[in-house]
Each structure stands twice: as C-alpha cells, then as structure tokens.
Amino acid sequence: MANVSVICTVLNEGPAIQKLLDSLAGQTRPADEIIFVDGGSTDETVAILQAFAAKRHLPLRVMVAPGANISRGRNLAIEAAAGPIIASTDAGVRLDPCWLEELLKPFQATPQTAVVSGFFVPDPQTAFEVALGATVLPALADVNPATFLPSSRSIAFLKSSWQAAGRYPEWLDYCEDLIFDFRLRDEVGPFAFAPQAVVYFRPRSSLRAFFKQYYQYARGDGKADLWRKRHAIRYFTYLGALPFLLMLMILVSPWWGLFGALVGGWGMFYTPYRRLPSLWQSLSAVQKLQAVGWVPLIRVTGDVAKMLGYPAGWKWRLSRLPTQPELRWR
C-alpha cells in the first residue's frame, strides 16, 4: 500500500488537541507521516504537538504559518506531504481506531480510486448537544453514498487529484471543503464511501456558539454562491408563507394556525426527532425532555443565523467579483 500523509490545521487548540493526538497514535493503520499546520497560535498548541511527537515517537511535523486560514493551512500541509495519498482531519475531534485503515480500503480494493469519503458522528455531552446533533447532522441512514459530500474532517484523496482540482480555495474562510469537494468531483467523478472511517466531534455547547457557527457557514455559502434554492426556500418560508398563514388565521379561521403548525412542524422537526433516540442513550429522563424542547429552538435559531449570514456573504462576493475571477468557480 502506498504511503499516506495525514494533515490537519490548528489554531489555539491547547490541551484540547490531546484527544486527536491520542487517537492518531492509536490507529490500527499508522500514518506514514502526520503534518500539522498552525495558523499562528498564541497558546501552547505548538509546544504540545512537538512534545507529544517526541514522547510517542510519531512521524509528526509542525509547520507554523501565522495568519493562514484553513484552506491555506491544508494546502501548505499537502505541498509538504511526501505520500501520494492525503488523509485530512480537523482539530477538536477524535478518530475511531480504524479510521485510517477504513479510509484506505477503497484504494486497496480499486486502484482507480481517487477520493474516499469518510463519515463523522456527534459526540455529545449534554442534552443541548444531543439535540443539536440530531437537528443539524445527518445519520448514516440519511446518506446517499453516490451524492454525499464529505467534510474535510474525514476524507482521503490522491495528492495528484488535489492538484488537478485546483487545491483548496484560499479565498474562502468557511465552506472551503464543499468547494473543494465540487472541484474534486468534477475532476475525478464519484467518490468512494467508507462509512466505518468515523470521526467523533463534539457539537457546539451553547445556542450562542451555534448561532455564530451557522452565521459563518451561511456567510461562506454567500461568498461561494452555494445553495441558492435552499436559502430561497428558507426566506420564502419565514418571510412569505408564515405571514400569509397568520393572515389566514386572522381573516378566515384560527384553524389555519393548527393546520400550519402540523404541516410546518412535520417538515421542520420530524427528522431531528427521528434521530434523537440514537443519541440520547446516556441521558436521564429529564435530560431527554430537555433535548426534545431544544430541537425547535435550535432549528429556528439556525434558520435565522443563515438568513442573516447569507446576504452578508453575497455582499462580500459582489464587492470582489469584478477583480477576483477565481470567485467564478463554476
């Protein structure tokens, strides 16, 4: 099997990086090299990485690139990688012991494989985090392997494919892995899927942190001109259909409110509530009720964050489009 280089970008991770390092060291198929790119941490992140590599005798290198965003960091790591296969993950996660072994199986089984999609699952610690994971993250049963676009917290690809696809887009601070996925798929065709190549990560721990995260994601969508129809449907629902329903309640019958609540509630909350039981095994009965109550608030908060972030991204895009032709990525 060809050598594989694992890459990761970090910034002010501190002791939180330990769980990722431990899981890298415990892989059933060890990486031939591990490259971390630090974007200019002001804490002890770099020292922790270096000390861990020396203590565990890992083939780990740390590159420091102050000011580098995630795309720039990944590109620097891949440029420096010796292996023909790149496996990418993120800080703030822990890897299943078989993660790298499972990612590499499709390359072994089919020599023509160019990209392998891994999977990721929430690792919640509170009732809020359980509700958040159920609301915003796909379960394996929800995934169509033929169309699934992997996060760069769990993906492997040929270094030559990365080059042919134009590398990670350094002009994007969020959604960069989606643009990279689109470019890869255009270049090499469908990806292989390795559902057992699992990365565990903890969802945001507060509604405020979640709002900020989804605002930034939606701003990235606007910058990259992603998901126009999805965002249009969201605006129509909240700014068009909901006011129209309220008008019917006032002018025609209050029963329209019940009808709208049933139809809208089914569409917005059925999937999160279907996923909840698979995530809440460790919760008490009271915490399970709390998780049930969090779901609607999380869904509406996420929608509001997206509705505010998307136009902010488009404003950024329109101001730079005339002078940055790389924004016309498709």
Image (cartoon, rainbow, N blue to C red):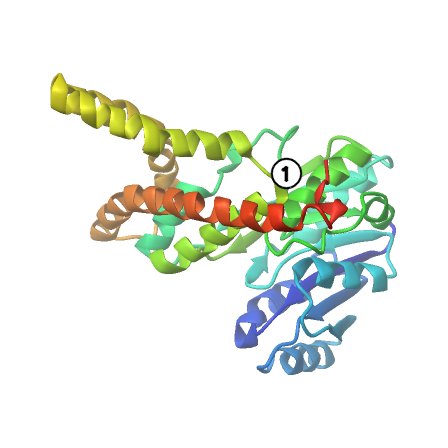
Q: Which residue is drawn at 39% across and 46% down?
A: 302
In the image, is 30 to the left or to the right of 127?
A: right
Taking depth in this image into account, of 69 and 284 the one nearest to the observer is 69
Amino acid tagged 1: Leu
Q: Where is residue 139 in the image (x, y as percent from the top left)?
A: 48, 38
Location of residue 111 with respect to 213 vertically, above or below: above
The quadrant in which residue 258 appears is top left
Q: Can residue 196 be seen in this view?
A: no
Q: Where is residue 13 in the image (x, y as percent from the top left)?
A: 56, 72
User: Residue lying furthest top in this view?
Assistant: 252
Taking depth in this image into account, of 105 and 140 the one nearest to the observer is 140
In the image, is 14 to the left or to the right of 6?
A: left
In the image, is 297 to the left or to the right of 254?
A: right
Q: Residues within 10 Å of mark 1 (few under 14, many from 20)?
A: many
Count of numbered labels shown in the rendering: 1
Q: Which residue is drawn at 39% across and 29% down?
A: 236
Q: Is residue 84 visible?
A: yes
Location of residue 134 with respect to 74 vertically, above or below: above
Taking depth in this image into account, of 271 and 240 the one nearest to the observer is 240
The quadrant in which residue 256 appears is top left
Q: Where is residue 105 in the image (x, y as percent from the top left)?
A: 75, 42
Quadrant for the C terminus in the image = top right
In the image, is 257 to the left or to the right of 275?
A: left
Instruction: Report which residue position mark 1 lands on.
Output: 149
Which element carries disc 1, helix, strand or loop?
loop
Q: Which residue is drawn at 53% across and 71% down?
A: 16
